[in-house]
Image (cartoon, rainbow, N blue to C red):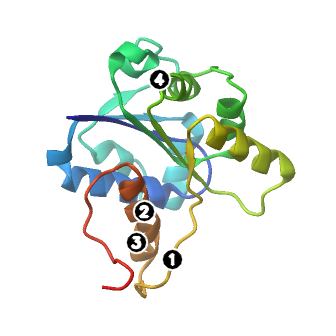
Amino acid sequence: MRRILVCVTGASGSIYAQSLLQKLMLARSQWEQLAVVMTTNAKAVWNTELEPNTWKEFDVLRYETNDFSAPFASGSGQYDTMIVVPCSMGTLGRIATGVSSDLITRAADVVLKERRKLICVVRETPYNLIHIRNMETITLAGGIICPATPSFYSRPSTLQEVAATVTDRVMDLAGLSVKTFRWGQ
């Protein structure tokens, strides 16, 4: 059974984290444990972009960014998938350079060294050369860069539907089943 870690950083795009957590709640039969780590900035941005403190409504294991006793801080914790959504460029840079200064970057280091799945949903535009090189480094290390770039094939009509075009793709990348628009169907 799957063990999934969702990390939320302070980049704009809290709707992506909310959408992903909602979809993971609906897919409970596909995972055994779901843990969430949110930075202080992530909580502030969530409260600015969405209904304040609604991140507390999800029935998940929660860890603070300084809690290095969390099971996914070690490879023996057996978390197989880590999704950083949205992933700030600061967090991306720390992951790319192996700087394990908090629980998120330590967990990413563990996931990469154990050859497990790391998905970074980057939310920035435009990219500078440092961003691109950090994305390249993470890709070469085995991570997946999934820009928070929505698609419009399905003709989304609400912000939630637009966000779902990204989070459905993340669910696919994580190897989870999700009912979504499929090209050619």
Quadrant of image for the N terminus: top left
Q: Indicate which disc, 4 or 1, sits on the residue closer to the N terminus.
A: 4
Q: Is residue 131 left or right of residue 102?
A: right
Which of marks 1 and 3 precedes in the sequence?
Answer: 1
Three-letter code, disc 2: Arg
Front residue of this view, candidates 48 and 94: 94
Q: Disc 4 residue type?
A: Glu
Mark number for residue 114? 4
Alpha carbons under labels 4 and 1: distance apart: 32 Å
Query: In the rendered structure, which disc, 3 or 4, sits on the residue that comes first in sequence?
Result: 4
Q: Which residue is mark 2?
A: 169
Q: Are marks 2 and 1 in contact (CB under 8 Å)?
A: yes
Tell me which corner region of the image, top left, top right, bottom left or bottom right, holds residue 159.
bottom left
Q: Nearer the viewer, mark 4 or mark 1?
A: 4
Q: Check residue 151 in the rendering and tell me which mark sits there, or answer none.
A: 1
103 is higher (above) or lower (below) than 17: above
Of callouts 2 and 1, which one flags the residue occurring earlier in the amino acid sequence?
A: 1
Q: CA distance from mark 2 to mark 4?
A: 23 Å
- What residue is shown with label 3? 160
- Residues under numbered marks 4 and 1 in contact, where contact means CB atoms less than 8 Å apart: no
Label 2 or label 4, whichever comes before in sequence order: 4
CA–CA distance between discs 3 and 2?
14 Å
Q: Secondary structure at mark 4?
A: loop
